[in-house]
Structures are given as C-alpha cells and as structure tokens.
Image (cartoon, coloured by chain):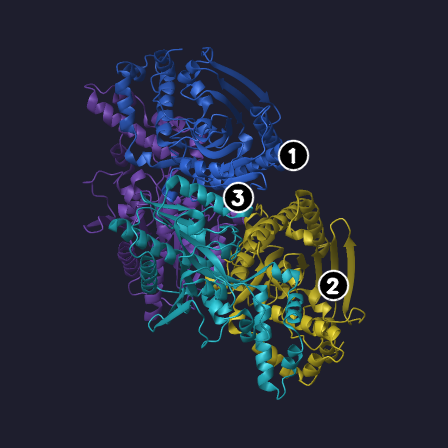
Chain colours: A purple, B blue, C cyan, D yellow
Amino acid sequence: MGKEKTNQDAGAGTVNIYTDLALEERERFSRNVEIEGVKIDKQYDRKLNMTTTVVDIFNREGSKAMGKPEGSYITMETRLLKDFDEETRRTISAQLAEHIHQMLKGEKIKNILIVGLGNSQATPDALGPKVAENIITGQNVYCISPGVLAQTGMETYSIIKGIVGEVNPDIVIAIDSLAARNLRRVTTTIQLTDTGITPGSGVGNHRMGLDEKSLGRKVIAIGVPMVVSGATIVNDTMEKLLHILSSVEKTNYMSDIFSRYTSKEKYQLFEELLSEDTEQMFVTPKDIDEIVENLSRLIAHSLNKFCDEMINIA
Amino acid sequence: MGKEKTNQDAGAGTVNIYTDLALEERERFSRNVEIEGVKIDKQYDRKLNMTTTVVDIFNREGSKAMGKPEGSYITMETRLLKDFDEETRRTISAQLAEHIHQMLKGEKIKNILIVGLGNSQATPDALGPKVAENIITGQNVYCISPGVLAQTGMETYSIIKGIVGEVNPDIVIAIDSLAARNLRRVTTTIQLTDTGITPGSGVGNHRMGLDEKSLGRKVIAIGVPMVVSGATIVNDTMEKLLHILSSVEKTNYMSDIFSRYTSKEKYQLFEELLSEDTEQMFVTPKDIDEIVENLSRLIAHSLNKFCDEMINIA
Amino acid sequence: MGKEKTNQDAGAGTVNIYTDLALEERERFSRNVEIEGVKIDKQYDRKLNMTTTVVDIFNREGSKAMGKPEGSYITMETRLLKDFDEETRRTISAQLAEHIHQMLKGEKIKNILIVGLGNSQATPDALGPKVAENIITGQNVYCISPGVLAQTGMETYSIIKGIVGEVNPDIVIAIDSLAARNLRRVTTTIQLTDTGITPGSGVGNHRMGLDEKSLGRKVIAIGVPMVVSGATIVNDTMEKLLHILSSVEKTNYMSDIFSRYTSKEKYQLFEELLSEDTEQMFVTPKDIDEIVENLSRLIAHSLNKFCDEMINIA
Amino acid sequence: MGKEKTNQDAGAGTVNIYTDLALEERERFSRNVEIEGVKIDKQYDRKLNMTTTVVDIFNREGSKAMGKPEGSYITMETRLLKDFDEETRRTISAQLAEHIHQMLKGEKIKNILIVGLGNSQATPDALGPKVAENIITGQNVYCISPGVLAQTGMETYSIIKGIVGEVNPDIVIAIDSLAARNLRRVTTTIQLTDTGITPGSGVGNHRMGLDEKSLGRKVIAIGVPMVVSGATIVNDTMEKLLHILSSVEKTNYMSDIFSRYTSKEKYQLFEELLSEDTEQMFVTPKDIDEIVENLSRLIAHSLNKFCDEMINIA
C-alpha cells in the first residue's frame, strides 16, 4: 500500500506521533485493508483476558508501509499486567519464555547477553535496569545495565558493541521501556521482536540501533510502553472532540474547519497546540513505581526460565 | 465579586480544574478586577528571575470568591527551582525561611513538628517524605513522615492529631506535593500558607484537613506543584485551539460552536474528553526524580535554618 | 537459679553481651539445669531443617533468671531464611501466621495496628519499615513506620501511643531488627513474643517500651537478628581460642591465666579489647541488602495472611 | 628488606590479612626501617586534621617488599571524611583533584573514562556506582558502572576492555570500595594510585586487574576503605590481648604460648578462630548508608572539577 493511502486512512485529526509498537502502526490502517508484506495473527486467551498479536513484516514494502524493520513482532496485551497474582505471573512469564524460544527455533545458543536499557534513576525508564537486577547470571548468561547517554556520555551502542566483542554471546536480549501512542497500552502490553531496538525509541533516547546488522548477533528486544508523550494527549483529545461533536451536531462545524486545512496546515496547528512545557512532560500512571517493580520481576522471571532451558539444551 | 461574573471571565474553554495554588485561583479573574476581601502584592527579583506573590484573603467574601480559606498565601515562582547552583539554593532557602518567620511574627515558638506528607514510593508525591529525611531533629524539633492512607489504612489527620497530643508542639509545618492547573508552574513554584493543608488536595488524597481548627495549633503548609492532571492537558489544548483558530479564521467557527452550548453542556463535553485512562495518569516532568531530590534538599535546608533560628530565639 | 551460678556456667570467656533473643538467654545456662519459672519446648521440622523453640517465662523468678519479661517467646531457626524458594516462603509464613493466632487464642480482634520499627535508611535496621511497605492495609488493618529517634526527635513510644489513642486498635504487632549474641543466628532466626519490644533493644535504640502495660493493648513483637555487636566477635574469638588451646596443650596456660583473674578483672580486660571503633561498627552479612528484602516479604506475607483470617473471623 | 625480617617485625599475633592500602603495608615495618625501593613523604594539615602520605614504590625490590605494584600511592586521612560541612568538602575535593593532576603531569588528556566499580545493591560496596551517578559526562568525559561479576556474569575487566576499545579514552579513572586492615581507617581514608586496581581486592571481588598493562591506558584508582574483614577483628583482638597481658603480667604467659608455635602453626590457629560465619560477614560502621552518600558526592565533585579543568586545558 502506498503512503498517500495511508495518510487518508489516518483521518483528519491524526498527527504522526511516534510509537514503538508495531501493533499501533498497524492500527493506522483500516482493519480490512491488507498491507503487502505484512501478515497478522491474533489470538485471545479468555482466562487471562489477553490478546496475543503476531505481526510479521516479511519484505521491503511491508517494512516501508509499517515504518518498522522486517521481522517478527509479538504483543501480549492484558490489563492484568498492571496488577497480577503469583499464578498469573507464572502463566504470563512462561508464555513469554515460549515466544522467545519460538523466535530462535533451530538456532543453537550457548551464550546469552541480556541488556537492561534505560535510566534506573527515572522511574518509567527503569524497567530495563530493574529486569537486569533480577537476572540470574552464570557461566553462559551475561547481563549488563549500561545506563543512558546522559549518564555515560557514550552511545549505548558503543558500550554493547565493546562488550559483545569481548564476551562473544550468541544472541543479545535487550529490555527497554517503550513509548506508546495510546494511553490504554501503557503498562498493559509486552512487545517482543527479533528486529532489535531501533533508534530514537521509547522513553530515553538510545540513538544507535542494537540489531543483527550492527552487532553481528540476533537481537531480541522486549519492551513495555511506560509513557505516552504530551503529543498523544493532545491528539487523543482532538480525536475525541471531533467524534463527540460529529455525533452531536447535524452539520459538523469542526470537521468543516479541518477540511479546509491542508495536511501541512493541520500538522502546524498540532505543533502549536504542543507547548514546549508539554514536550518535556511524561504522561504516566500514578502507580508507575509499583508497576515497574512488578513487571520487571515478571520479565526477569521469564528470561531466567528461558536461559535456564536454553543453556541446558545446548 | 459574584460567582457568575467569575465564570464568564473564565472563558468558553475553562472547566473548573482543581488547583492547590491560591495564585491560580486568582488568575481565573481578570487582572484589573478587584476582589473583595483579597489583597495581592507582587514583587520581582531580577537576579533570581523570581516573582514573589503574597495573596491575603482576609474575610468571608474573599474566601468564598477564591475558594480557599482565609489566611496568607505566598508563592515564589522561578524557573531556577528546576536546576540551581549552590548559591541560588542558599538565597532561595534563606528567603523561604524569612517568609516563615514573618508568618509567625510575634509568636513564641518552643517546639516545632514538621510533617512530610505524601508517598515516598511514588516519585512526584515523595517531596514531603524526602524533605523529612533531611530535617535535623533535636530536643525541640520533631519530624514525621506518616505515609498515605493507602499505606497506613489511617487518615493522616488521625496520625498527626495523635502525635500532636503526645509531643505538644507550638506549631506544625507540613510539606506536600501539590497539583497545579498550569503546566508552567510544575516544579517552578513554592507556595507557603498559614491556612494548613485543606482536604482533597494535591497528588495524593489526604482527606481530612490539617489546620489550626482541627489540630489546635497554627499549621504552616509548604507545597510545590509536581503534577498537573490529565484534565489540565485537555483544557490547555482546548484553550490553545480556540486561541489559534480565532487568530487564523475571520469568523471563529469554533467559538461559535461553543457559544451555542450552555455551561453545563460544555462541562459535559470536557468530561467526555477525559477518558478513564487519562484520569489515572500523572503529567510530570521527565526529570522528576532529580527535581524532587534537589527541591527536597532546598526546603529541608530552609526549615533547618528556620528551626535553628527560632529555637535559639526562644 | 542464683546469679552466681549462672556466671560460673557461662565460663571464663563470657562477658554479658546483650541479646534480644530469649533463646540465647536460655543458652547461658547448662542444658540440664532446670530454671524455675521457665518452660521450654523444642520441635524440629526435618523438611525445613527448622527448629522451633517455645520459651514460656511464667513467673517472677523465671523473668529474673532470664532477664526478660514474663510471657511467651517463639523462635523459628533455619538457614533457609537466608535464601528460600517460593514454596518454602509460603510454608514458613503460614507457620508464623499460625503462631500469632495461637498467641491470641480466644481474643476477639477487630482492629490491628502494625508497626514497622527501625531506620529505613540503614540496611540492617530496615526490616520493620520494609515489612510495613508490603502490608495490605484496609478498614481494620492500620500500619505505620514511625522512623527512629534520630530521624523524628521523638520517642517511638510517644508516636505509637498517640496513634493508638486515635485509631484504637485491639492489638499492636511490631516488627524490628534485633541484635543476637551468636553470629549463626543472624538472619536465620525469627522471634515472636507477646511481651512487646523492651527498651534498649536491637540495632537502633527505641528507648521506651511498647508493651501491654504502656499501650493498654497486647503487643506482639516479631524480630529477626540482623547484626551482632563488635563485642560478640571479640567474645567469640576468645572462647574459640580457649577451646582450641585447651585441646592442643596438655596444661592449659591460657585457662591458667584467666583463672587467676576475678570476674571483675576479666570484664575489664574484655572492655579494653573492645575499642571505641569496634563499638560503632556493625557485623552483618555481606548480602544483607538482599536478605532484608526477602525476609521483609516473608513476614509481610505472613501478617497479611494473619490479618485477613483474623478480620474475617471477627 | 627480606621477607623473613618483615615477618619478625610484624609480631607474634599478626596474620597476613589483606589490605588495599599501601599505607597499611608500610605499617607492617618498623617506622625506622628503610625499605629499598620505597620512598615515603608525610604531611599534616592542621586545619583539616588531615595526614597526606605519598608512598612511591619505584623498583622491583620495593614492589616485592610492599606486596604492591610499582607506582605512586597517595592517602588522605582525616576523621572529617565521616562527617563534613560544605567548606571542608570543597577543600578536600580540590586537594584530591590536584593530586590527580600531579599524577598525570605532562600528559595530554583528551578523553577520560570514569569507572564506578562495585555493587550498587550492597551499601558498603556502592561507593563506585554512587560516584558514577554524580559524574557530569560530556563529549570527552565517559562514565560507566559495570556492576559486579555476580550481577553480570562477566569479568569487570572484559566489560571495561570492550568499552575502552570502542570509545578510546586517554586515561581510565576507577573508583572502588576498599578493604582495610585497621578499623580506624574505615571511611576515614582516601587512597589514590596510578597503578590501577589489582585483583582480589576490596569488598567485592573484581578478579582481573584494570591497569596500564591490561588496558593500554594509565589507570588511576581512587578508593575508600569501607569494611574490615572478620579476620581483622580477630587479629585486632589478639594483638590487644597480648599487649594488655604483657603490661599486666611480669612473665608474659601468652607470649610464651605463642613463642612455642611455628609461624605455620600460628597461622592455622588464626584460621580456626575465623569461623565460616565470620568470613561471610562485613564489619562496617553503623551509619554506612549516610557515609557512602556523602563520600560519593565529595569524590564525584572532585572528579567533575578535574575533568572540567583537564578538558579545558586540552
């Protein structure tokens, strides 16, 4: 599908707000539209009230349409991620471990480097470092929390590349906090991908990509959206406003107004609605400290399980 | 000034969003309108780029118009609160200590109870507990961080009342994180008041008031806005939208739309724009962890200075 | 049993080092000696490799001989407390909850106040505050971490008495870090008693007692030894030295030396061996941070279970 | 000086307990003995009550006698390190920065890598990571906290070597918690050396050395003793015992006993006095949490000053 079509689908009120979730890129398109080079599979688990979506981007067109590299993206979505009991934790972390196994099917793994990305000093960005705290390392399981550029003065990529050169792992698994476009996804979604972590992503700003091309090893990335940007809030508000007004008014004055603007003018309007203050703000759940604590244990538990199984097989 | 006038002044897009700042209540009114029972004094310090505003509410009418109890409210506003060097810290904390002295002019103080309100486990609500960590207690300076209702199962009021009964302080000084209406005020404003902490305020929810009436001692409250609510973002967006559109369009379709709604209808519209998700979100600066750390040291430094001077005088 | 006898039993190298554990007071006496007013029952759980000892001090003589108030003292000792899996945690915390139920047999409990004693800023003293963090409070379960005298400027007793007066609980359960005499007991023993927390105890220094007499409510205290004092190390060394030398030498020169000193002279010798530096030191396990984290979860889990059962019965 | 001589000087009760401090190695020898290949200079600052000692080990004999690599060792000793005001902090950190400049005299430095060694999760080992938190990084100042082997599964050396290869700094400055032999030195001494961090040192166990030979860059190490081992306590006790007894008794029975043992037998005796429990224990000051916090700020302040000056010169 061409780019123009995409924009039309996206509707009057939509500005191209960044998201780390392939799922959310897919949602820019109408549900019935088939996108070339992209395959989607959804499954619903009633007990966990969990939707698992596998998005496969398998050629250049798919990659271009989605704005994401070719590869596999698995998302597990459930409100239970916000607050779960021990049994649920075990079930979800077993499923997550299983997804990692599937992504590596056939590959022989002897050494694993786990990388906890993000800033341990900023709660919504602390997921990676907190997962790293709970990893059980050993002879073949390595783990590092490199910190962020502002702390280290170095590109995260340089640190990881240096370490990879020294300890020579077969794969890298990176955990990071993500940015979502939709408030509902914050802390309710885990995304798993074999395409690595792409530049400019998430809460922090880890600029150079960690992926198979740059590191010479498959890089599996696990992320959870922890924030939406101020832009998202503005956008959400506008979309709701249009929706509400259009259902209240016979003639939709509002849509009228927007219809007279070009795309570029609309974009400028939204830019102006985003004040400088808003841009330096996070929108994050009130109980984010507790959620990061719980989610980091769940993911660490899952990775410990995966490493244990993988190393024992090898 | 009557209430109806107030609402008209406030403009089409304004919903009554809660603020802890007397200053922001004042801003609902036109600058030139004189409000009965309210006296305002502003001073500007060029070096600190700081505006100090004293709002005195001295009778019932003033209290009613402002929606705040009678008493004195001092706000110190400067961007420097976000990031300051040691000299600035000393200057600002000396001024803050001086303001506390002025509020107590003539009173003889022998014992002081400092109360760090808020939740040490939730960064933007941790200001009070973090100030408490840095208080130098002694024979006549007491300090407590009671925690929040969700942690203790008890009203903060009950805990403080019990302690006041046992240690019998001459005054109570309470520190808390506040909620502002305006993003610009977040972490750039310190408010000091002798009216205590009123119910339903700020980040947490400390329901029963700590004030002279309930505790039998003068209660000085020191607060810094740490968050704005989702509602604020929606409101800010709408106000800007109206403003931008009115300057772009000859005929303001948007204002036209709103002019046809009653106040109640407008309120309902905004309610709908606020999703459940938004309400459970904080909007807070990206570097909130560091800001809370720095501000808590500044305020603690100021209180230590005040207590030291006060106890030595007595 | 008279005091003189006790000292003879204790052997040449023993100085009267403070311990919070009734169990360790008992160990000053020969195993076969029966102490009037004291009843002891031991049980061993093979699976947990756990020894549970119930010491009942039921009259004045027993209290005098043991140097502890009349009441019941239960200790659960197992190396597993240092490092346990989830199943072990559940088993131990269920047993602990059961012991609390037994101590309250017959009493009708409607409200419970849980008090996490100690200093959250000093790792080995942070057990109480960390347990408090994990308590699920509610309509009838209250919880407070009052901090320590150096932080608050107030006696812990005053704070708790004030709160008890306001919220009127039926019982108080206090959790604290303890001091042991024997290194082996550090982080491997939980002591439960219905005699409250007595003055001068443990890691911190909570001077006025929290007990039924002072608070007008039964006070159950739960403690885990987190440190031994420098004095303990000196003492342990001397005892070992005597033991080793006596088994190596035909004539025990060392014992000869000590036999010529009076008790008072020996005490002075040990005093001199304890430098000022040693006294300001903790002896604590290298992984104390992790142990405090794990133990606080175990105890909180147990208290949550107890409160849940108790409130539902009532 | 030969090794045998050394042992005789060290006295009957001395076991060769590890110390990271060159100063303490020097103290094994009589004050008047001149050691070949070792130069010592002491200066006393009355105002700070601070002794600064420069130990230069400038050849193989010196290195052998001292059990330390050739190079320069500077120690700054003052009780003020435990508790200092702002002015003292500035003075001491300026002196420390000056010492680093002197060690690098003549060298042109364009890039600096600062390494915070140790375990942020174990208070006495957290000095390095906490210094790292407060470093101001920039275009030419890099900083990393690699964690410890138990956390990462990797030799610290491998991590740092990898990073050095990528970012190519001119020097490496490593900060670590040290082990001392003498309780008095704990948290009262800063050691600075240009010989790097040697294996087996300090609180943690960073096994492969970070030094000029292994990394190809000069490595300056800054350390503060944070613990003494259980062995130290045992040894201190024994030495005091001998001392006290010898001044009390005409004939020194105790020394008699030890004189009949060979060195090997004495060593075995001390080994036995060290129980397994003792070895897994830290001896550390009661207020270690606060001391680590303060010292890390002092050292970070000093390094920020040094980097700022160095980069500006270059």
Percent across and percent down for residue C281 are 59, 60
Position above or below: D138 against D269: above
Estimate how packed mark 1 is, as few (under 14), some (14 to 19) or many (20 or more) residues with alpha carbons within 10 Å. few
Q: Which mark is residue C17?
A: none
Q: CA distance from mark 3 to mark 1?
A: 19 Å
Depth check: D278 or A135 in front? D278
Task: Specify whether residue B187 is in view.
Answer: yes
- Helix, strand or loop under label 3: helix
Position above or below: C98 against A13: below
Q: Residue furthest bottom?
A: C250
The verdict on a common chain for dots 1 and 2 is: no
Percent across and percent down for residue B5 are 37, 11
Position above or below: D289 against B232: below
The verdict on a common chain for dots 3 and 2 is: no
Q: CA distance from mark 1 to mark 2?
A: 48 Å
- In the picture of the structure, the residue carrying the numbered disc 1 is B312
What residue type is disc 2 on?
Val
- Helix, strand or loop under label 1: helix
Residue D203 falls in which quadrant of the image? Answer: bottom right
Question: Residue at position x 45%, y 71% from top?
Answer: C35
Estimate how packed mark 3 is, as few (under 14), some (14 to 19) or many (20 or more) residues with alpha carbons within 10 Å. many
- Helix, strand or loop under label 2: strand
From the viewer's perspective, is the residue at label 1 or at label 2 nearer? 1
What residue type is disc 3 on?
Thr
Chain ID of residue with mark 3: C
What residue type is disc 1 on?
Asn
Q: Which mark is residue C152?
A: 3
Q: Which mark is residue D55?
A: 2
Chain ID of residue with mark 1: B
